[in-house]
Image (cartoon, rainbow, N blue to C red):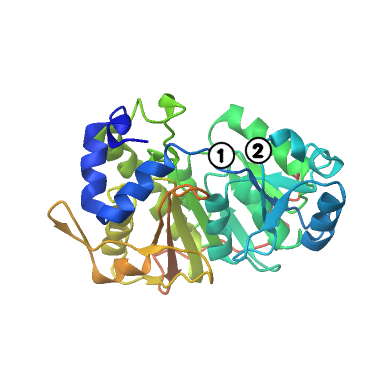
Amino acid sequence: MQMSEYESIPALFRERLQHLVTPEQYEQVLHSFSVSRPLSFRANTLKISAAELAEELKTAQVPISQIPWYKDAFILSSLEIQQLIHPRYVDGSLYVQSLSSMVPALVLDPQPSDLILDLTAAPGSKTTQIAAMMGNAGQIIANELSLVRIFKLQANLKKQGVTNTVVRRSPGEFLWKKFSEYFDRSLVDAPCSMEGRFSLSDPETYEDWSYKKIKELSMRQSHLLRSAVTATRPGGVIVYSTCTLAPEENEGVVNWLLEKEHGNVVLEEIQIEGLEMIPGVTEWRGKTFMPELTKTARILPSETMEGFFVAKLKKIGTSIVQQPEKRSFNRFSKKRRY
């Protein structure tokens, strides 16, 4: 595709992208907007192991290849989704999910005994992945504000056989007031401008993009992230992720959080062997970020990956004055589980 064919993508976005990445990466990203990525999915290990799923699909002559950096993930080596219509797809033994979307849960690294917060959980891709990684042990609080999206979240939890999750409907920005320093680990997969998902075949993915929208979203993202930090106990881990490239929504939000927390939160390195990522930036449009922002990671859009940003934070000090509420897995015993 000639460069002129990318002109439908907002000029300001293209100009910003040129300042964010190298010339070679710039061409790679623009090219990625013109390709159809192969379908990716992961084995739902609550129902079947990755090895068993791979064997069954290969026996059924479904063309798949395994992802080297995530043993439970696969790519359908065909653009025909019909080839994945298999009993294991119907019964929830596999979950269709973009590869980049699988990264935040891997960085979170949930343990079976953990109490987990998924602050903006719908439609449940990461919630169900976390539940599978925990073997349905421990407990997940999956929060979502939109009632319509909650229905989709509940349906996914049920189909995937998730039993350790409680769905809660509340504004994520204020959840810390109810659960101060309560969780072992928290995930904030924040609403964003979705630059990493632009597609020339679907102009709706970028027609509403604007710098004003980026600024508005960054304010909400900041409050969501700080709410999750306050809701996480000292010693706990918080993962912040978006599917956008904009530093205002990524490094800028994390930098703001670090300044507000005055040393109570630190960034940790992100390492997933075999996954190509680039470090976060420490300067953007005249604003300087803390040097440790290089510990954050950006996945550039490619022929197989959507664009994504991930930050891993460790809480090392308390961010509240009052005593935290006593933690108990029985807290939600009277509420419906999924």
Is 267 rendered above or below residue 123?
below
Q: Nearer the viewer, mark 2 or mark 1?
A: 2
Q: Secondary structure at mark 2?
A: helix
For image coordinates 46% across by 27% down, the residue present is 202
Instruction: Give left or right: position of 307 versus 115.
Output: left
Inter-mark Cα distance, 2 to 1: 9 Å
State the residue lying farthest toward the front: 2
The disc placed on residue 144 is 1
For image coordinates 68% across by 64% down, the residue present is 71
The disc placed on residue 153 is 2
Q: Secondary structure at mark 1?
A: loop
The location of residue 129, given as percent across then percent down, is 66, 54
| Quadrant containing the N terminus in the rendered view | top left
Circles 2 and 1 in contact, beta carbons < 8 Å: yes
- Foreground of the two, 175 or 99: 99
The disc placed on residue 205 is none
For image coordinates 23% across by 33% down, the residue present is 11
Mark 2 or mark 1, earlier in chain: 1
- Foreground of the two, 302 or 175: 302
Let me know if residue 222 appears in the view: no
Is 132 rendered above or below residue 207?
below
Q: Residues within 10 Å of mark 1 (few under 14, many from 20)?
A: many
Q: Quadrant of residue 298?
A: bottom left
The location of residue 108, given as percent across then percent down, is 55, 63
The location of residue 306, given as percent across then percent down, is 48, 47
Let me know if residue 112 appears in the view: yes
| Quadrant containing the C terminus in the rendered view | top right
Instruction: Give left or right: position of 71 versus 158.
Output: left
Q: Amino acid at mark 1?
A: Glu
Instruction: Give left or right: position of 146 versus 220.
Output: right
Q: Amino acid at mark 2?
A: Leu
